[in-house]
Image (cartoon, grey):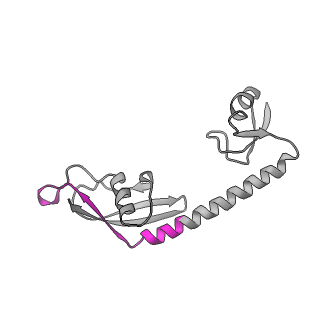
Amino acid sequence: MAKIILSQEVIGLGAAGDVVEVKDGYARNYLFPRGLATVWTKGGERQVESIRAARAARAQHNLEDAQAQAERLTGETVSVPVKAGAEGRLFGTVKPAQIAEAIEAAGLGAVDKRTITIEKSIKRTGRHVVAVRLHEDVVASVELDVVAA
């Protein structure tokens, strides 16, 4: 078993800065050539601390960005044009990708479609509310105005 320091996040193994033990072949043939890890040494503890400090600073910066974007999104109404039939019934439902495009078109910033949560399928025109998870601690409610295109 080899004791290593992860320099990047490896799914199923750990985050950057973690000290883990893996089999020698896995470290030598996969992690080291790809630059995902370095050999653990006593002097490497300083490297671990600098990686952890950088990760903490990056997490704080991401949280602040998410809070700022949540303030922009909350209270705003975003118009989503869709194909609709008689009496406001839609041909299909409103998808998260359509919502993300509408948010970006409204000038409220880019939002990943995977972060949008639709409680109940949107099958009619009118006003609807969806949740956007911008960070693990920040969720913004966005009001949609679904209109016939």
- Left or right of 85? Residue 114 is right
Q: Quadrant of residue 36?
A: top right
Residue 72 drawn above or below residue 122: below
Image quadrant for the C terminus?
bottom left
Residue 141 drawn above or below residue 118: below
Q: Does the image show residue 42?
A: yes
Return the x and y of residue 127 as percentages of the image width and height: 27, 66
Most extreme residue toward the left is 86
Return the x and y of residue 132 as percentages of the image width and height: 43, 60
Return the x and y of residue 17 as percentages of the image width and height: 73, 48
Q: Nearer the viewer, residue 116 or 43?
A: 43
Q: Quadrant of residue 98?
A: bottom left
Read off the magenta span. Answer: 66-90
Return the x and y of residue 50 as percentages of the image width and height: 77, 55
Q: Does the image show residue 130?
A: no
Which residue is pictured at 49% across the width and 60% down the height? 134
Which residue is pictured at 16% across the width and 60% down the height? 88
- Left or right of 45? Residue 106 is left
Which residue is pictured at 44% across the width and 63% down the height? 109
Residue 95 drawn above or below residue 5: below
Image quadrant for the N terminus?
top right
Q: Is residue 60 magenta?
A: no
Looking at the rendered structure, the number of numbered marks drawn on it comes to: 0
Which residue is pictured at 67% across the width and 45% down the height? 8
Most extreme residue toward the right is 42
